[in-house]
Each structure stands twice: as structure tokens, then as C-alpha cells.
């Protein structure tokens, strides 16, 4: 069963996606 590892991987991917967009937005705000 790879269900747990799949969920873990998905949540990690999702978290990094969110973090990236947040960092990008704040970086743009700093640049202006």
C-alpha cells in the first residue's frame, strides 16, 4: 500500500506550490 506515501508526497507538492506563490508575491511587493 502506497496510499500514505502518496498523500505525503501530494501534500508536500501542494505546500511547496503554495510557498512558491507566496514568496513570489511578497518578492514582487518588495521590488515595488
Image (spheres, rainbow, N blue to C red):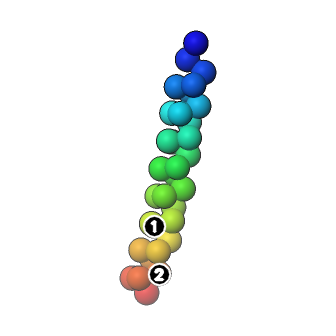
Q: Is residue 12 above or below residue 22?
A: above
Left or right of 12 in this view: 1: right
Q: Which quadrant is the N terminus positioned in?
A: top right
Residue at 52 percent of width and 25 percent of height? 5
Report the front residue among 9 and 25.
9
Q: Quadrant of residue 28?
A: bottom left
Q: Residue at (47%, 50%) from the top-left corner?
A: 16
At 53% from the left and 33% from the top, the residue drawn is 8
The residue to which callout 1 is attached is 24
Q: Which of disc 2 and disc 1 is earlier in sequence?
A: 1
Q: Quadrant of residue 27?
A: bottom left
Q: What is the spatial separation of the Cα atoms under label 1 and label 2, in whole angstroms?
A: 9 Å
Q: Quadrant of residue 30?
A: bottom left
| Label 1 residue SS | helix
Q: Is residue 15 above or below residue 4?
A: below
- Image vertical order of residue 31 relative to residue 18, above or below: below
Residue 18, horizontal then vertical, whole percent = 54, 56
Q: Residue furthest left?
A: 31
Q: Quick check: marks 1 and 2 in contact, CB under 8 Å?
A: no
Looking at the picture, how far across and down is residue 19, in whole percent? Answer: 48, 58
Question: Looking at the picture, how far across and down is residue 17, in whole percent?
Answer: 51, 51
Depth check: give the residue in front, 3 or 13: 3
Residue holding disc 2:
29
Residue drawn at 47 percent across, 81 percent down:
29
Amino acid at each position: 500500500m502506497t496510499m500514505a506515501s502518496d498523500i505525503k508526497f501530494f501534500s508536500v507538492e501542494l505546500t511547496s506550490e503554495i510557498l512558491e506563490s507566496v514568496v513570489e508575491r511578497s518578492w514582487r511587493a518588495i521590488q515595488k
